[in-house]
Image: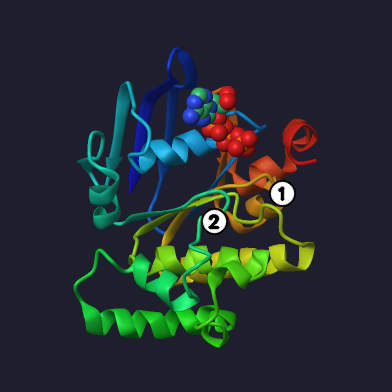
């Protein structure tokens, strides 16, 4: 579904990604793990067209998406939930959700999808008229994910979905991610909470200073002693 081949990304003269190659297959949950500054967010931003890629290729469903605008990339079916959620605090929950569907013309289907999303996130239904800025951290994360789903993505990019959330809320975010996959959405996520992320993922990649240094099935990564020691806390 997504094939990234040997990409380089620079911030001015600093290399943030170097010869990075990964693949995501349809229906998978794939997780990226690695220390702060390894380049995980940069990779998601490069896929979304938010960072310039200076070498290599990115293909989505067989089509080269390098050089496409972020807007075109969303329309092709890739939605991105950035780190820190970026919801609009002075808009209501419902207004935030409507923004998620701005690229769509199929109004009837949007109403139907909204119902499905409310059954996935009942708290958002209860709070649909409330200002998003007054939601708890976990509710804001749910809203950010729900808003991305309203773009009807085939591939969802999640950047640190559990960051800053209380442990019980972290569990419910991971539950929701598992439910989203069951709806047929493929997921590529970045998580500091690497062990939990691998437990719901099919495969994982370990990034170090802009390159992949390990990859494997979740089981392989979870049971590798060196990886456990270095990355799984
Ligand atoms: P974290 O978990 O801390 O978010 P990360 O693995 O997502 O880390 P990135 O945010 O992708 O890492 O950053 C990769 C490298 O690129 C880091 O060295 C970072 O300082 C640098 N970097 C990121 N954004 C910029 C920018 N806008 N300008 C210059 N350097 C940047």
Q: Which residue is mark 1?
A: 195
Q: Secondary structure at mark 2?
A: loop
Left or right position of 177 against 116: right
| Residue 54 figure quarter | top left
What's the mark number on residue 85?
2
| Towards the viewer: 195 or 67 | 67
- Looking at the image, the residue that sits furthest to the top is 13
Neighbour tally class for label 1: few under 14, some 14-19, many 20 plus, Cα within 10 Å? some
What's the colour scheme?
Answer: rainbow
Q: Is residue 109 above or below residue 134?
A: below
Left or right position of 224 against 61: right
| Residue 103 figure quarter | bottom left
Q: Residue at x 65, y 66 (%)?
A: 138
Q: Residue at x 58, y 63 (%)?
A: 141
| Towards the viewer: 99 or 52 | 99
What's the mark number on residue 220?
none
């Amino acid at each position: 579904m997504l094939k990234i081949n040997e990409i380089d990304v620079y911030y001015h003269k600093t290399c943030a990604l170097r010869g990075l190659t990964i693949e995501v297959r349809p229906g998978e949950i794939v997780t990226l793990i690695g220390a702060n500054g390894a380049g995980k967010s940069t990779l998601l931003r490069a896929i979304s067209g938010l960072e310039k890629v200076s070498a290599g290729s990115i293909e989505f469903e067989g089509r080269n998406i390098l050089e496409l605008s972020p807007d075109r990339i969303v329309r092709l079916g890739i939605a991105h939930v950035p780190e820190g959620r970026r919801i609009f605090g002075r808009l209501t929950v419902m207004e935030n959700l409507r923004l998620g569907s701005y690229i769509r013309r199929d109004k009837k289907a949007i109403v139907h999808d909204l119902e499905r999303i409310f059954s996935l996130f009942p708290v958002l239904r209860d709070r649909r008229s409330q200002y998003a800025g007054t939601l708890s951290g976990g509710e804001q994360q749910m809203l950010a994910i729900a808003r991305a789903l309203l773009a009807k993505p085939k591939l969802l990019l999640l950047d640190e979905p559990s960051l800053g959330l209380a442990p019980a809320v972290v569990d419910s975010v991971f539950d929701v991610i598992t439910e989203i996959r069951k709806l047929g959405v493929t997921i590529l996520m970045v998580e500091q909470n690497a062990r939990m992320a691998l437990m719901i993922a099919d495969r994982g990649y370990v990034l170090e200073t802009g390159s992949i240094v390990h990859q494997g099935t979740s089981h392989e990564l979870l049971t590798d002693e060196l990886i456990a020691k270095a990355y799984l806390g």
